[in-house]
Image (tube, rainbow, N blue to C red):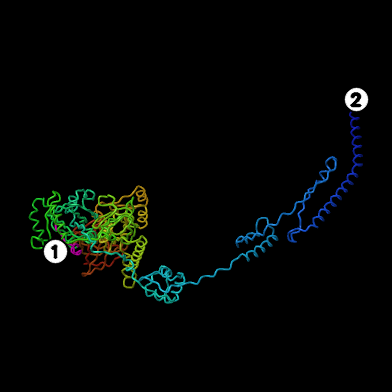
Amino acid sequence: MADSKKRKTDRNKSQAHVKAKARTNKEKIKKVQPVKEKQKKERIDKDKLKEKSVITEKEEKKPPFPQKDKKKKIIIIKRKIKAQDKRPEAPRVEEKKQVIKPKEIKPVIKVKEVTEKEAKRAPYKRGVTFRKGYYEKKEFEKRIDLVKKKPEEIAPRILPKEINITETITVGEMAKKMNIKASELIKKMMELGEIVTINKVMDADTATLVGSEYGINVKVISLYEETKIQLEEDDKKKDHIQRSPVVTIMGHVDHGKTLLLDVIRKSNIIAHEAGGITQHIGAYKVKIDFKGRQEEIVFVDTPGHEAFTTMRARGAQVTDIVVLIIAADDGIMPQTIESINHAKEAKVPIIVAINKIDLKGVSTHIERIKQELTKYQLLPEEWGGDVMVVTISAKEQKNIEKLLESILVQAEILELKANPRIMARGTILESKKDPARGATATVLIQNGTLKLGDPFVAGIHSGKVRAMYNDWTQPIREAPPSTPVLITGLDGIPLAGDPFQVVDTEKYSRLISQKRKELKKEDVVKSIQKISLDNLYEQIKKGKIKELKIVLKADVEGSVEALRHSLTKLSTDEVQLKIIHHGVGDIAETDVMLTSASNAIIIGFNVKYNKKVEELAKKEKVSIRLYKIIYDAIDDIKKAMEGLLEPLLKEEGRGFAEVMQVFPVSRYGVIAGCKVTSGKIMRGDNARIIRDDEIIYEGRIESLKRFKDDVKEVSEGLECGIYLGPDFKNIKESDVIESYIVVKLPRTL
């Protein structure tokens, strides 16, 4: 207890001591505070006096820059009074005042040009108030007015005084030549009373009239004249040298043309041809010994199948001599006669080679063949004519040298010459699209020398010789006259038989190519049939005609041409064969999609297709048929077209029955009691009722009964009941009922 009381007294003493100390501190603060306030006021007054004195001193000194920039920036570094109050008193220190002098004024910077877009957006930048933005906008507008340039004056339209057009021209092309907008020209033509569109084709007279409205003289020129290649070359006779003869081997299919060429060339060409028949034009150069010197002969092998008429015609046009092959066992055949006519049309000499003399019993046929040749104005030399006739055996290689000597003798008579110093000219024999090389063409150089890098025009296409190969596929740099070569570097696939011409520059070759394409386009436009009152009925009638649509792909252009020519011949008045697309190269996915959209079939000749195309064809249910031999393709298409023909309807009489008695039945109508006079009457057959030699009704035997039983047929001499249905009730005694059926017979082309 004593300890607790002692603790309480100690605590009370300490509290009283703290309170007394706090009381003394308050009294001290009350005494010191007035003194501090007084010192603070004195200090502020002193600072104000010093600031005034500094400013007056500076104002007395005149600055070296303009009056408007007299203001001085004075920064006085002061101690914060509040911070000093908080700190304990310390000895007084005079404050240092630093005055920063204004920097020299920089030259005025030019106002940056402001675009209209920036001017509109600037016043409305983020954080700009409406009023501030309003004034900024005004300032920007003033600056824009100063910066803005005067609007440029639109140059006046210059119309040509004269333009050149072809016989037909579209409205769009005419407007371009006249240097006006197509819409303006269309408006002008509407004012003249003609409603046109931008793609409408106008004739030369209309174009001349429209041109006169604008004061333009319209000159009509022939586009064909512009497609002619004009070269300034000096073809001197002293530069002419003797060239190799070009010999075309012609004749009927399977008469031994390619085998003969194999023997001459000592190669196996026939192994590369499907079915053992030639289906392309092949050109080869052969070297032989003649009179102690080496001579060259160029051989062109043409197909003998009837489908390749155009190829044979083309072979006759590029040749100097025609070797007509006739098999001793077959004699003169249809394609042999056709080959004779082609050679006569081309006005080239003919050498007749009678092949297969190694066969037994053909010696008597040789004289008969010579006799038949006289019917076509081909008289053998033995009989006093001018036609050389050589008997050979390609299989056993008999008299081959004699045939070659005859060719060279004929070439000497012709005196064949060419100038190797001029630009090359020739003819396209074949063309195709190679997967690795692109568009390629076999060219027979007829005059001049073809070199690597020469620009050329081939038909409607142009190009530059990138690479050149001989008939053994060896790369060469030059091709003299009478040389067949394979070239690359074409921009398209020319047609077989197109002229080939080397020109000065690539620019000129492209210009000629463009003009020729325009001419072709113009011919297509002209060929489009317009509907008139005369052919309107024919057009309506053609709507009922059935069509077989085909997409045709082949390995070379010549095969495409031959197939097109042969297949279009199959068209009749009732079934038309329409080739919607044809091209060179393998079958692609685009061909399948086109076929699917057109409900057609794909015919491929010596081409192939990949797995993707096969899968797409299965998905689209497109039929793809591939062929190696041309007559197989023609036969299959012929059968397909025959399937589209409406069958012939033929009536076959079954029998006759005479009406003996008529039985009216209220529920069914009339039943004729008859006796079969000839043949037989069958239920379900067609029937006609004849009265006084006139047909009064045609229908069908609905029911046939003998006594009370339904029967299928009733033979001659038997009686029966015939029911013809509820539609006809005017049956009389002595009428004759004829029973017959209609048979459908298939038709052939």
Q: Name the residue under label 2.
A: 6
Residue 473: x and y in percent read 27, 50
Q: Does any portion of residue 602 appear in the rendered image?
A: no
Residue lying at 22% horizontally and 53% vertically, measured from the top left: 285
Q: Which of 126 and 574 is in front in this view?
A: 126
Q: In which quarter of the image is residue 150?
A: bottom right
Quarter of the picture containing the C terminus is bottom left
- What's the residue type where badge 1 is placed? Tyr
- Distance, label 1 to label 2, CA atoms, is 166 Å
* Label 1 crowd (10 A; few <14 / some 14-19 / many >=20): few
Which element is circle 2 on? helix
Residue situated in front as seen by the camera: 723 or 641: 641
| Marks 1 and 2 in Cβ contact (< 8 Å) | no
The range drawn in magenta is: 342-352
Q: What percent of the width, then of the height, locates residue 730?
A: 27, 67
Give the residue pinned by disc 1: 376
